[in-house]
Amino acid sequence: MDWNELKETSIFPVGQPNDAYARFFDGQSWLQSLSTAQVGIANVSFEPGCRNHWHIHHAKQGGGQILLVTAGRGYYQEWGQPARELHPGDVVNIPPEVKHWHGAARDSAFQHLASRCPGWRPPTSGASRWTRQSINCYPELLLQGLVTM
């Protein structure tokens, strides 16, 4: 699937180029928040060959991430395991504390919905207080040290 075909056939908005967080990806990705109520859900789109870097979603209890593949062909890989090829309709359940990456195959654009599981909350200290908005954007979590590469 090429990038134009993905854009034309996507059932969710592709969103804007994810340029602010390009340093966490090899290639161009796009991000569109779909929901911030109850459970954060985002549509993440990748040009052919784009993938995110190795990272970990930290959680003291509960937590993790779910990927729902909606278009194209891509891969998911956990540290020390072989890569798993992904196709529309595939579901990837990623437990907290598992080092992994995901992204497009070299010859196909790729798209998935990403959802963080309830219970995944950042630590609080002193008077600092996190809002639901502050934990719903994956790249912000990288910058805030709540996930690591």
Image (cartoon, grey):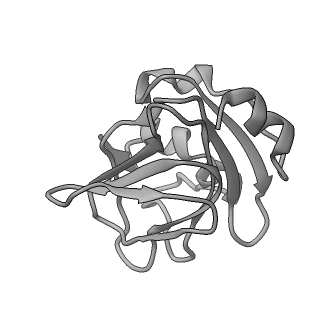
| Residue 102 x, y percent position in the rendering | 42, 48
Q: Is residue 125 visible?
A: no
Q: Residue at x 53, y 51 (%)?
A: 128
Q: Residue at x 81, y 46 (%)?
A: 10
Q: In the image, is 76 to the left or to the right of 108?
A: left
| Nearer to me, 88 or 51 | 88
Q: Which image quadrant for residue 109?
A: top right
Q: Residue at x 45, y 39 (%)?
A: 105
Determine whether 99 is above or below 144 in the image. below
Q: Residue at x 42, y 29 (%)?
A: 24
Determine whether 79 is above or below 18 in the image. below
Q: How many marks?
A: 0
| Residue 144 x, y percent position in the rendering | 45, 40
| Residue 92 x, y percent position in the rendering | 47, 68
Q: Which image quadrant for residue 64?
A: bottom left
Q: In the image, is 32 to the left or to the right of 75?
A: right
| Residue 23 x, y percent position in the rendering | 43, 22
